[in-house]
């Protein structure tokens, strides 16, 4: 009998690790080819790992809730088949995502690797393991390896989790939430002074942070525990508000020509391309053009560094049947024509609803678009999808009376109007830039060529 080493398969270039959610097969169970062995999760997509061979599960090498690196051996399968070599992570069978349920715009973005600053070297000598996500958050908050080593983790074998680090940062900056424990047994020295943009760690004698008011519960109230997705959403929203001072600018746009053009071409387009054309690809095209005009909106922040992105990767918030949201990303959106954008939008939206997105398809966005108009809302003030610096909300399109300037004087006409609202990080995007950007998006929509060929 040969023993086969089952590896955690590769799930995309930017996905380095996953968490074991549930073992569906136990030691001693017989396994058929393509049987699901376990369920895993990244920060955005839950997936199944199937068996590429038939045999018997001999050993599980990780427990539930353990974090596993891509390419690591996760199980041993005993098989009658002859095995010449063990599959590498690149040739391992790709997992099929089955439950897409943890997103509000951006949780994936936390895994983007920060740019290292040669001017501010970090203390990287540490025997303790830290996930790429934890390292990224630490880099954004200017937390050194020495300081990380002093935080006690609650994960497996004392591993520092994202929640541990976020709780520590909240306490360090005088925020709310349970504080992470500090390991007083380590011999690592305490830094003499904190970075200029990070508040000093509160001491035992410092004033306690303001406590949140206790929620009153009556006998008939139902208490619902947050699931893993909702906890991730809550953490990400609090982190975004804590990280970036939000400002929102609004513009009302007359999109009559755009609406009439779509009505004119949609039937022939669907017949020719076998695809329905919605307003979303039109919005994305306008955003991509505006980002080329204002590249300093297509950036992220790493400490005191501004990272100007080469690619324009636009995420679009897609609603799931469960009522949750996920943000698949259209890579290099500025290089696609309207037909290509339409096909990409429809494909990603359809696979999101069917829980078929791959983890890498929610990664590396540089800007996010959310359509609050799909809920009948006229405008919204969205929270920035970190580590991006801006997010655009488009409201519902409504017929309204509007004043038009003509060569014969002003007239009142029925027009198709909509609001666009841009939330942006006021650390690096000021009112002039943010306001000019959202105005430029509106200009591209308002000046739509009603005779445009597609």
Image: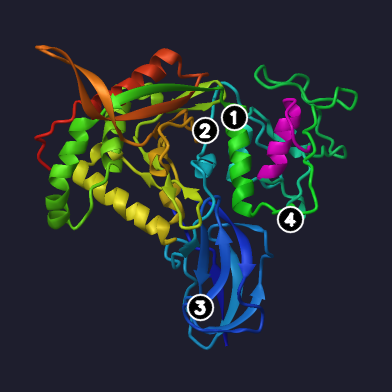
Give the magenta part as a residue range.
Answer: 162-178
Compared to 55, does 255 lie above or below?
A: above
Q: Which residue is mark 4?
A: 156
Task: Work out whether mark 4 precedes mark 2 in sequence or the reverse, and give the earlier one.
Answer: 4
Residue 272 forms part of the magenta stretch: no
Quarter holding the N terminus is bottom right
Element marked by disc 4: helix
Where residue 241 is drawn, which disc sits there?
A: 1
- Mark 1–mark 2 contact, CB under 8 Å? yes
Of residues 52 and 40, the one drawn nearer to the viewer in this rendering: 40
Is label 3 or label 4 in front? 3
Residue 83 image position (x, y, % from top left): 48, 80
Where residue 35 is drawn, which disc sits there?
A: 3
Q: Quadrant of residue 298?
A: top left
Residue 168 forms part of the magenta stretch: yes
Q: Which residue is mark 2?
A: 383
x 37%, y 39%: residue = 314
Q: CA distance from mark 1 to mark 4?
A: 29 Å
Task: Work out whether mark 3 precedes mark 2 in sequence or the reverse, and give the earlier one.
Answer: 3
Tell me if I can see residue 202 in this picture. Answer: yes
Q: CA distance from mark 1 to mark 2?
A: 7 Å
Q: Main secondary structure of the magenta part?
A: helix
- The reply, left or right, for residue 450 in relation to residue 359 is left
Task: Work out whether mark 1 precedes mark 4 in sequence or the reverse, and give the earlier one.
Answer: 4
């Amino acid at each position: 009998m040969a023993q086969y080493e089952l590896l955690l398969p590769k799930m995309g270039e930017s996905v380095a690790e996953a968490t074991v959610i549930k073992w569906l097969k136990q030691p001693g169970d017989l396994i058929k080819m393509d049987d699901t062995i376990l369920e895993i999760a990244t920060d955005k997509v839950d997936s199944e790992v199937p068996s590429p061979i038939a045999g018997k599960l001999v050993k599980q090498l990780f427990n539930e809730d353990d974090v596993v690196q891509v390419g690591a051996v996760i199980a041993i399968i005993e098989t009658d088949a002859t095995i010449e070599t063990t599959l590498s992570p690149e040739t391992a069978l790709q997992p099929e995502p089955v439950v897409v349920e943890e997103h509000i715009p951006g949780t994936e973005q936390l895994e983007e690797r920060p740019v290292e600053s040669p001017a501010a070297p970090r203390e990287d000598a540490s025997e303790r393991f830290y996930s790429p996500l934890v390292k990224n958050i630490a880099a954004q908050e200017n937390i050194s390896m020495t300081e990380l080593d002093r935080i006690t983790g609650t994960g497996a074998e004392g591993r520092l989790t994202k929640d541990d680090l976020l709780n520590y940062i909240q306490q360090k900056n005088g925020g709310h939430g349970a504080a992470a424990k500090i390991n007083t047994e380590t011999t690592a020295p305490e830094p003499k002074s904190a970075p200029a943009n990070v508040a000093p760690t509160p001491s035992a004698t410092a004033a306690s942070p303001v406590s949140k008011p206790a929620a009153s519960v009556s006998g008939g109230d139902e208490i619902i525990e947050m699931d893993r997705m909702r906890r991730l959403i809550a953490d990400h929203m609090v982190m975004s508000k804590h990280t970036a001072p939000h400002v929102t600018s609004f513009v009302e746009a007359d999109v009559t020509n755009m609406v009439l053009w779509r009505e004119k071409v949609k039937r022939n387009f669907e017949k020719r391309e076998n695809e329905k054309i919605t307003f979303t690809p039109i919005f994305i095209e306008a955003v991509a053009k505006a980002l080329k005009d204002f590249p300093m909106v297509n950036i992220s922040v790493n400490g005191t560094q501004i990272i100007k992105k080469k690619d324009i990767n636009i995420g679009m918030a897609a609603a799931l049947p469960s009522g949750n949201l996920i943000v698949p990303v259209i890579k290099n959106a500025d290089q696609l024509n309207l037909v290509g954008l339409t096909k990409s939008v429809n494909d990603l939206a359809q696979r999101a609803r069917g829980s078929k997105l791959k983890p890498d398809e929610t990664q590396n966005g540089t800007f996010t678009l959310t359509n609050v108009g799909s809920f009948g809302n006229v405008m919204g003030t969205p929270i920035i999808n970190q580590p991006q610096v801006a997010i655009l909300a488009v409201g519902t399109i409504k017929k309204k009376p509007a004043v038009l300037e003509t060569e014969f004087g002003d007239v009142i006409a029925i027009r198709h109007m909509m609001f666009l609202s841009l939330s942006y990080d006021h650390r690096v995007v000021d009112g002039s830039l943010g306001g000019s950007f959202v105005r430029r998006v509106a200009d591209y929509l308002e000046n739509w060529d009603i005779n445009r060929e597609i």
